[in-house]
């Protein structure tokens, strides 16, 4: 076996067996991580392990997804029955599908929390701005992954969520209809759409993800690792092995255990076979899109689309919008920043439900302003009012709290985040038959 | 002495190779787009549907044709209208609620009256229609292409 040793060890093999194994494992780890990391970066609340958990979930998704491919049939006639077979006949099929389903859902949560954590620590400025953009792209990719995967079981939930999702696209001026036709391979959700979504979900998107994720990891190391507050004394640096590796191993084991237990207890949902004549009542999109669906109930789709676009653009341009690196690594910038964030969150918690109620029961702009076209009364007007409200919050924090630009942005974004969260919660729990407001208890 | 407009052999070959390369790339791009573009199967998304004798539909009634993806509505004064079941908001299928005398979309709560006019937003415009023709007293609906409309009008109705 001398040739094998020469192949895997750079210098001669270590004398003992256990050291040989370790030498290989260690050089793999040090390929990903730097040899030493700052002690501060190892404190758990510095990262909450969110990026690592997301990467782990991605690996779980790839493995479980490849296995599922062996049992799935991307045709309208057979897709639903092949998923049914997974649930009932195939040994461990239901568990495997549940692991894939819940890992995909959990990944949306951990990736968003990762984004929030990086924003809070100010880790998007200066040399890290490129990786902030890459991260946003990866989050978008995760959502597209979820969207394309959603159609594959070909049940009622799948069919109508994709119908609504692509219907939303058609409101985009000029480009919307061609993109929707291209995605669906026709005017409606049918066999060409299922084939397209499957190819995207299992081939094209994974390739993009592998390249994007590799670049994201590489950039983290290049940009100096986790964002840390500037310290007067030089911080001690600890060796990656074992200090960082042990933490990662622990977090990975806890995540996997939690995910597998959850998947054993709660199987992935599967509704009735898709029926193009009768949407279920209420017909809802996937839970992570329900915030946008709730927005659609209150304004013209073009306005809702624009608002979402403005939000996304704001996040993408954040590194240019906030370049103040003085408070780098301090969560929410400063005590004032923390206060601004708390105020923003509180306003979001108060105002969003209030606006939903007022629009639902009392305010009917199209009837009130019957002379204006609905595109103005139900679209432009709510859009401008929303943007004016956001500007007012920013201005209020600047003058009321004497907050710096960077601190006021914390308040503004925390308002937007909480508002989106409230809208999502309303969409999930408080919308019943015909999308009317209900009280679930 | 060479003239200004002549070009060296090297430049000519470079330009020629670039042009050929560009042409090749355009061709590959075109092929990919065509390969990925919408694939249509004849009749998959609609065709001619025979609805039945005009006299068999009572006034002020709505009859669903699930396979044709439309409703045949008859107003109280006898006019016919083939209404698409595709909600103009985001494409969900509307259903006819006879007790409320309206089409209702379960996805986002839009309501439409018998002629497909919007009673309750968020739908931005009335339901699409399909052209109806009469052949030996039988109503024939062409579901190949829906006709969008911004408001309802009497001339959209067909009287037999």
Image: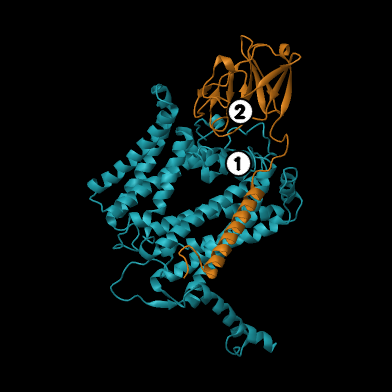
Q: Is residue A386 above or below residue A221?
A: above
Residue A20 falls in image quadrant: bottom right
Residue A191 falls in image quadrant: top right
Q: Is residue A36 left or right of residue A103?
A: left
Q: In x, y percent, where is residue B102?
A: 58, 20
Label 1 marks which chain's residue? A
Residue at image point 73% right, 25% down: B49
| Badge 1: residue crowd in 10 Å (few <14, some 14–19, many ≥20) | many
Is disc 2 placed on a helix, strand or loop?
Answer: loop
Query: Quick one: B2 or A440, which is closer to the camera?
Result: B2
| Pointer 1 residue | A181
Tell me the number on the disc at residue A363. none
Badges 1 and 2, same chain: no
Looking at the colours in the rendered structure, which chain would you say is drawn in orange?
B
Looking at the colours in the rendered structure, which chain would you say is drawn in cyan?
A
Residue at image point 68% right, 87% down: A3
For the question of whether residue A139 can be seen, the reply is yes
């Amino acid at each position: 076996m001398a040739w094998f040793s020469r192949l895997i060890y750079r210098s001669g093999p270590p004398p003992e067996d256990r050291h040989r194994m370790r030498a290989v494992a260690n050089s793999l780890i040090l390929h990903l991580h730097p040899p030493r990391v700052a002690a501060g970066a190892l404190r758990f609340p510095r990262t909450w392990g969110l990026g690592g958990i997301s990467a782990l979930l991605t690996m779980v998704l790839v493995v479980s997804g490849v296995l599922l491919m062996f049992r799935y049939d991307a045709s309208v006639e057979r897709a639903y029955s092949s998923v049914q077979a997974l649930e009932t006949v195939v040994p461990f099929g239901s568990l495997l599908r549940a692991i894939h389903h819940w890992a995909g859902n959990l990944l949306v949560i951990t990736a968003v929390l990762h984004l929030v954590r990086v924003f809070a620590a100010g880790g998007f400025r200066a040399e890290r701005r490129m990786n902030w953009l890459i991260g946003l792209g990866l989050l978008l990719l995760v959502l597209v992954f979820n969207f394309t995967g959603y159609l594959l079981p070909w049940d009622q939930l799948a069919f109508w969520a994709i119908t609504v999702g692509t219907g939303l696209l058609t409101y985009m001026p000029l480009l919307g209809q061609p993109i929707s036709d291209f995605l669906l391979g026709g005017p409606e959700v049918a066999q060409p759409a299922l084939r397209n979504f499957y190819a995207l979900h299992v081939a094209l998107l994974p390739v993009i993800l592998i390249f994007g994720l590799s670049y994201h990891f590489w950039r983290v190391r290049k940009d100096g690792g986790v964002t840390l507050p500037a310290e007067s004394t030089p911080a001690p640096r600890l060796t990656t092995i074992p200090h960082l590796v042990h933490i990662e191993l622990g977090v990975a084991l806890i995540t996997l255990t939690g995910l597998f237990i959850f998947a054993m207890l709660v199987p992935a949902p599967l509704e009735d076979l898709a029926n193009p004549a009768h949407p279920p009542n209420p017909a809802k999109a996937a839970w992570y899109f329900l915030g946008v669906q709730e927005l659609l109930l209150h304004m013209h789709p073009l306005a809702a689309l624009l608002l979402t676009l403005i939000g996304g653009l704001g996040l993408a341009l954040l590194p240019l919008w906030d370049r103040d690196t003085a408070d780098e690594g301090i969560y929410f910038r400063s005590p004032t920043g923390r206060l601004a964030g708390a105020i923003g969150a509180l306003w979001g918690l108060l105002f969003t439900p209030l606006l939903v109620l007022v629009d639902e029961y009392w305010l009917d702009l199209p009837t009130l302003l019957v002379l204006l076209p609905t595109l103005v009364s139900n679209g432009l007007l709510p859009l401008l009012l929303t943007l004016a409200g956001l500007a007012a919050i920013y201005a209020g924090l600047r003058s009321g709290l004497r907050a710096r630009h960077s601190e006021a942005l914390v308040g503004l974004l925390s308002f937007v985040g909480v508002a989106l969260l409230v809208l999502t919660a309303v969409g999930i729990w408080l919308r019943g038959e015909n999308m009317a407001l209900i009280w679930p208890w | 002495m060479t003239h200004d407009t002549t070009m060296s052999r090297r430049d000519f070959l470079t330009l020629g190779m670039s042009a050929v390369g560009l042409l090749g790339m355009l061709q590959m791009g075109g092929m990919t787009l065509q390969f990925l573009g919408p694939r249509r199967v004849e009749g998959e998304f609609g065709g001619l549907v025979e609805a039945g004798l005009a006299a068999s539909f009572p006034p002020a009634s709505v009859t669903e044709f699930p396979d044709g993806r439309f409703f045949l509505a008859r107003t109280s004064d006898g006019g016919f209208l083939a209404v698409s079941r595709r909600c103009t908001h985001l494409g969900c299928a509307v259903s006819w609620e006879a007790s409320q005398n309206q089409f209702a979309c379960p996805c986002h709560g839009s309501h439409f009256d018998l002629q497909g006019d919007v009673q309750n937003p968020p739908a931005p415009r009335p339901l699409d229609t399909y052209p109806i023709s009469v052949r030996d007293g039988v109503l024939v609906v062409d579901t190949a292409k829906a006709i969008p409309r911004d408001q309802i009008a009497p001339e959209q109705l067909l009287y037999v």
